[in-house]
Image (spheres, rainbow, N blue to C red):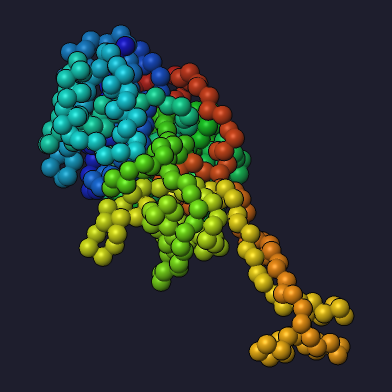
């Protein structure tokens, strides 16, 4: 079996590495290769500084194909489609054997910043390597090949023709909402009900018309058929992915190296709200920033000193004006502390007493009582916050953010089903967009 890894073919001006894989599959089908599983769309550390958008890397595993012809075609695809020179450094690798070192590299690519020299060293283990630019793309390409998914989801990505890529993507909100409701909880992040916004469509000039994410391939095909798409599309592919799994946040942050992702746990030390609606607090001496657009800032403001929390996120590099902070991506309230207030005592008539003046004890406003009594300690109920997980509003989700509805669902593996790949350029069983 050959594992092909590809990364960094796009720029902010266009392209998407998933589209290159869509084109690659056309070739594989024409060559009668055996495609072993859904292509993998692996999201790597979202906190690295040079990603274009979502730090996605791709892998596809195939058998029954001539490796020379395959490699030649991969080079052709990179040369034809990759946006070289626009801050992209495309790379493709083919591995016929994947060892523990490659797997470990892949695991670390999810939550640390890896060195390019490490990528070059591991590339020596590949059967074939092709890259352009500075070789940065090798990191993602190798990481995609070595990835092991403990939990996974699927995404159907539908592609536009090149001459439509600058046009607005048109979809009806009503259709999307109806599809979302009909497929809940087996698709996710279709629509943000807090902000009345469609989440399926990207906004750039890339060839992706829409992406539907969910738990199984079948439901994604059902979902796309529920949408009225006026624009003629080139086709779609279903990918298997670590999106929606929080895979980057499973690492306990030990060192505060910039760009590390993971989580920390501890009790809230100091906490203050900042102008612009952001909230800052510290845990174990680490400053944590909760930004307003995440929708988590309001939750953070209800925390108090002594609450025990786990927070997930990425370490942002210190700048001239800001110290190193952890940008918070979720807050799990583990233990709310009691807020104790000391109040004036209660009078025997039931009314709360007022102070009678300095060192003069208390007086009652409803009966004649005047005198000394012990102050009362009360525990205030924490009604505005619970011991549970809080995640950002869907609009602010990163690709890897695990949506609430996914908690408790178990990922399953599915074989390639009819219609997993549809292209107007090759015939495959079960193709077609119409219902
Ligand atoms: P996409 O648009 O497909 O979602 P992206 O465009 O945001 O992804 P890429 O174009 O893939 O991101 O660029 C990310 C670059 O960073 C690639 O060159 C990749 O090899 C590299 N990279 C990925 N993860 C790491 C990491 N953990 N450490 C260092 N470099 C990384």
Position of residue 214 in the picture relative to residue 145 (left or right): right
Residue 8 locus on image (x, y percent): 23, 36
Give the quadrant of residue 337: bottom right
Quarter containing the N terminus: top left
Residue 146 locus on image (x, y percent): 32, 23
Image quarter where ligand 1 lies = top left
**Residue at coordinates 49% horizontally, 57% vertically from top-left?**
268
Q: Is residue 362 visible?
A: yes
**Residue at coordinates 67% horizontally, 72% vertically from top-left?**
342
**Residue at coordinates 26% horizontally, 32% vertically from top-left?**
140
Answer above or below: position of 141 versus 3.
Answer: below
- Nearest the eye: 98 or 176: 98
- Nearest the eye: 81 or 313: 313
Residue 25 locus on image (x, y percent): 32, 23
- Nearest the eye: 259 or 51: 259
Q: Is residue 30 visible?
A: no
Position of residue 340 in the picture relative to residue 276 (left or right): right
Answer above or below: position of 292 versus 366.
Answer: above
Answer above or below: position of 110 versus 431.
Answer: below
How many marks are shown on the rendered structure?
A: 0
**Residue at coordinates 36% horizontally, 47% vertically from top-left?**
314
- Nearest the eye: 200 or 162: 200
Position of residue 143 in the picture relative to residue 148 (left or right): left
Give the quadrant of residue 323: bottom left
Residue 61 locus on image (x, y percent): 33, 18
Answer above or below: position of 94 versus 250.
Answer: above
């Amino acid at each position: 079996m050959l594992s092909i890894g590809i990364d960094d073919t796009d720029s902010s001006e266009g392209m998407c590495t998933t589209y290159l894989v869509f084109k690659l599959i056309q070739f594989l089908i024409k060559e009668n290769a055996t495609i072993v599983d859904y292509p993998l769309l692996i999201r790597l550390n979202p906190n690295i500084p040079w990603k274009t958008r979502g730090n996605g890397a791709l892998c596809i595993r195939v058998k029954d194909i001539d490796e020379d012809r395959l490699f030649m075609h991969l080079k052709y695809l990179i040369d034809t489609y990759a946006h070289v020179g626009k801050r992209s450094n495309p790379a493709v690798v083919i591995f016929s054997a994947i060892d523990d070192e490659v797997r470990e590299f892949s695991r670390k690519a999810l939550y640390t910043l890896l060195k390019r020299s490490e990528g070059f060293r591991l590339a020596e283990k590949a059967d074939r390597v092709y890259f352009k630019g500075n070789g940065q793309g090798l990191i993602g390409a190798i990481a995609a090949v070595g990835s092991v998914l403990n939990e996974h989801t699927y995404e159907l990505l539908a592609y536009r023709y090149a001459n439509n890529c600058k046009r607005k993507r048109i979809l009806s909100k009503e259709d999307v909402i109806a599809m979302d409701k009909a497929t809940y909880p087996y698709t996710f992040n279709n629509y943000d009900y807090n902000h009345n916004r469609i989440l399926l469509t990207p906004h750039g000039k890339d060839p992706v018309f829409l992406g539907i994410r969910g738990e199984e391939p079948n439901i994604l095909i059902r979902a796309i058929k529920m949408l009225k798409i006026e624009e003629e599309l080139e086709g779609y592919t279903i990918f298997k992915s670590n999106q929606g799994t929080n895979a980057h946040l499973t690492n306990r942050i030990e060192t505060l190296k910039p760009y590390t992702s993971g989580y920390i746990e501890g009790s809230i030390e100091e906490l203050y709200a900042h102008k612009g609606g952001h909230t800052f607090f510290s845990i174990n001496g680490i400053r944590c920033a909760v930004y307003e657009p995440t929708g988590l800032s309001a939750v953070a403001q209800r925390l108090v000193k002594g609450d025990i929390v786990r927070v997930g996120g990425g370490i942002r590099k210190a700048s001239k004006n800001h110290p190193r902070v952890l940008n918070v991506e979720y807050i799990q309230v583990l233990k709310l502390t009691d807020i104790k207030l000391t109040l004036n005592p209660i009078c025997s008539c039931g009314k709360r007493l007022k102070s009678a003046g300095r060192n003069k004890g208390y007086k009652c406003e409803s009966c004649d009582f005047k005198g000394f009594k012990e102050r009362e300690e009360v525990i205030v109920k924490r009604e505005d916050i619970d011991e549970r997980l809080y995640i950002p509003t869907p609009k602010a989700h990163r690709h890897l953010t695990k949506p609430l509805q996914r908690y408790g669902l178990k990922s399953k593996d599915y074989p390639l089903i009819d219609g997993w790949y549809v292209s107007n350029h090759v015939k495959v069983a079960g193709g077609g967009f119409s219902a």
